[in-house]
């Protein structure tokens, strides 16, 4: 995937989907579908990422290229492109960073899996915020990206003070001969599929609901760092996972999980919390791989949430904690086997 934060290095022409796409969930995939029609996803190297321009720091974990590839290797075929903003407009105006379902490197991976070939991260600043709807379409989409087809959700707003609607987008784009697809909001069971709904589900520990809305298990990816090694003394060694600071963490408690280690999935139990039994002061994310042993320090793991087992609690003794961990492991194995 080609990633750029500068229109001068964007590959053109394009077919473009516009939005924030935090989560790349089932609703987002509906917005992406019109520009992915006919996409040979199985022929794309979804692990290949090249970057250009001034990239946000979250991209440092992406595998990039030190050389700029041919700026238009596809010839005249429009590139399947996602256009989003960095930082998010809400962060720009409110000055508060919001935890993300998919930090940038994770969003890149999910978009690439779907067949997106280019990600354009428009730097959201005062200049961009002040563009009128007409200026946004002409400068960004027509002149900058040579968009041949645009796809947005029906709640998409753009331009100064979010004054541009999807009807405005269609009307303005039509003057340049550009087709616009407006995708209706996608509901499931009467509830709209949205990043907010997924956040709420994760905050409540309703993992099945969050995974259903996402269309895949919610993942926590990070590097194993040194911990206090208390788990070893209890007979349940754990890997302390350090996730990106922007990553949204679910409800504190104990989870049954699958752990991706070098491409192989292992059953496991995850604890997220402050470890009150041992008077822990900082929140930690610890994972115990069931029926596995080895050195995980400095290795990169992806943990996929499957079931919420229980809230974190304080026990009267370490023996009581050990008994509960044993029960958690047995229940996790049963649930993970049952769910496949």
Image: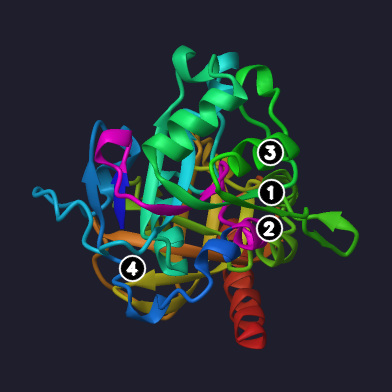
Distance between the Cα atoms at labels 2 and 1?
Answer: 9 Å
Chain-order first, disc 3 or disc 2: 2
Chain-order first, disc 4 or disc 3: 4
Chain-order first, disc 4 or disc 1: 4
Question: What residue sits right under mark 4 in the picture?
Answer: 46
Question: What residue sits right under mark 1 in the picture?
Answer: 153
Between residue 271 and residue 53, name the one nearer to us. Answer: 53
Which one is closest to the eye, mark 2 or mark 1? Answer: 1
Question: What residue sits right under mark 2 in the picture?
Answer: 27
Q: Is residue 7 above or below residue 3?
A: above
Chain-order first, disc 4 or disc 2: 2
Asked if residue 292 lies left or right of residue 132, the reply is left
In the image, what residue occupies the spot 68% across and 51% down?
A: 202
Which range is magenta?
4-31
Chain-order first, disc 2 or disc 1: 2
Q: Quadrant of residue 76?
A: bottom left
Residue 225 makes an appearance in the image: no
């Amino acid at each position: 995937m080609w990633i750029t934060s500068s229109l001068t290095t964007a590959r053109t022409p394009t077919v473009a989907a516009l939005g924030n796409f935090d989560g790349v969930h089932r609703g987002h995939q509906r917005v992406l579908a019109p520009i992915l029609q006919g996409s040979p996803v199985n022929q794309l190297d979804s692990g290949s990422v090249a970057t250009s321009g001034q990239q946000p720091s979250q991209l440092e974990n992406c595998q990039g290229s030190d050389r700029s590839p041919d700026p238009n290797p596809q010839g005249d075929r429009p590139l399947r492109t996602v256009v989003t903003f960095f930082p998010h407009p809400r962060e720009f105006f409110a000055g508060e960073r919001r935890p993300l379902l998919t930090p940038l490197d994770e969003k890149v991976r999910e978009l690439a899996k779907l067949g997106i070939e280019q990600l354009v991260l428009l730097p959201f600043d005062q200049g961009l915020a002040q563009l009128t709807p007409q200026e946004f379409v002409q400068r960004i989409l027509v002149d900058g990206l040579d968009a041949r087809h645009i796809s947005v959700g029906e709640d998409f707003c753009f331009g100064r003070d979010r004054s541009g609607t999807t009807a405005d987008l269609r009307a303005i784009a039509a003057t340049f001969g550009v087709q616009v697809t407006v995708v209706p909001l996608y509901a499931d069971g009467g509830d709209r599929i949205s990043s907010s709904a997924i956040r709420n589900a994760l905050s409540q520990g309703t993992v099945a609901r969050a995974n259903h809305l996402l269309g895949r298990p919610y993942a926590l990816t990070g590097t194993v760092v040194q911990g206090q090694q208390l788990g070893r003394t209890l007979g349940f060694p754990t890997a302390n996972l350090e996730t990106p600071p922007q990553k949204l963490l679910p409800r504190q408690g104990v989870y049954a999980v699958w752990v991706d280690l070098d491409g192989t999935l292992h059953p496991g139990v995850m604890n997220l919390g402050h470890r009150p039994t041992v008077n822990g002061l900082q929140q930690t994310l610890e994972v115990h791989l069931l029926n596995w042993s080895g050195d995980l320090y400095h290795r990169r793991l992806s943990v996929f949430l499957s079931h919420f087992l229980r809230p974190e609690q304080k026990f009267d003794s370490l023996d009581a904690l050990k008994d509960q961990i044993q029960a958690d492991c047995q229940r996790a194995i049963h649930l993970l086997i049952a769910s496949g």
